[in-house]
Image (cartoon, helix red, strand yellow):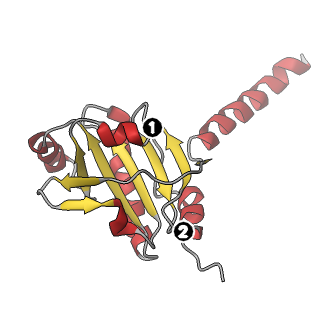
Amino acid sequence: MLFRSLLPFALLLVFADISAGTNTLSPSDGRAPDFVLSDIDGAQVRLDDFLGKVLVVNFWAVWCKPCREEMPSLDRGSRWLERFDGRIITINMGDSPEMIRRFLEKNPVNLPILLDADAEISANWGVTGLPTTFVVDPEGRIAYRAMGPREWDDPALLVPIRALGLDRR
């Protein structure tokens, strides 16, 4: 009888733990692999363009449902992070600029979208599934990695990301 009365509480704890884990960042280390990619308008973007800033790099594809679902929160998180001189960029794996534009017509976001047509950059970064997101500190080191979707406007994610850019003097 005691087991039956504790079962709902135990299930609540299990599900709370699972949902809490979906908005976490895993510590990581190493230098962020360099890249030079074009955005959907043809402008070239380099990793070095972001040195001195905290950078969130999200790898995604149009066909990836969790990727599409997290785009609005990436957009909101980007607006918040920009107030603190941080940036969020996205790197699309393999979709054509036309396909991405069609996606943006239905799902408008104001995020830089870079093209990794042959997935070479994604491979260099160790991306094995989508979405995968990396947080790069101002010195160009990977501080965190997140595999799977997140709510990128959640303070549980944004506060540690912003903290990477605080002056440590």
| Quadrant occupied by the C terminus | bottom right
> Can you give x and y, in whole percent of width and height, for residue 36 in the image?
27, 55
Q: Amino acid at mark 1?
A: Gly
In terms of depth relative to the viewer, which is nearer, 162 or 135? 135
Rendered residue at 22%/47% (across/down) = 115
Residue 60 in view in this figure: no
Q: Vertical placement of 118 versus 27: above or below?
A: above
In terms of depth relative to the viewer, which is nearer, 30 or 159? 30
- Name the image quarter holding residue 76: bottom left
Q: Of callouts 1 and 2, which one flags the residue occurring earlier in the amino acid sequence?
A: 1
> Can you give x and y, in whole percent of width and height, for residue 53 in the image?
45, 71
Q: Amino acid at mark 2?
A: Arg
In terms of depth relative to the viewer, which is nearer, 32 or 70? 32
Residue beneath disc 1:
126
Judged by depth in the image, the label closer to the viewer, 1 or 2, is 1
Extreme-top residue of the structure? 1
Side (left or right) of 36 relative to 130: left
> Can you give x and y, in whole percent of width and height, for residue 69 in the image?
35, 41
Q: Which mark is residue 65?
A: none
Badge 1: few (under 14), some or many (20 or more) residues near its Cα, within 10 Å?
A: few
Secondary structure of the residue carrying numbered label 2: helix
- Name the image quarter holding residue 109: bottom left
Side (left or right) of 42 relative to 36: left
> Can you give x and y, in whole percent of width and height, for residue 10 in the image?
78, 29
Rendered residue at 42%/61% (across/down) = 77
Residue 71 in view in this figure: yes
| Quadrant occupied by the N terminus | top right
Marks 1,2: beta carbons within 8 A:
no
Q: Which mark is residue 162?
A: 2
User: Alpha-carbon distance for marks 1 and 2?
Assistant: 24 Å
Rendered residue at 54%/62% (across/down) = 161
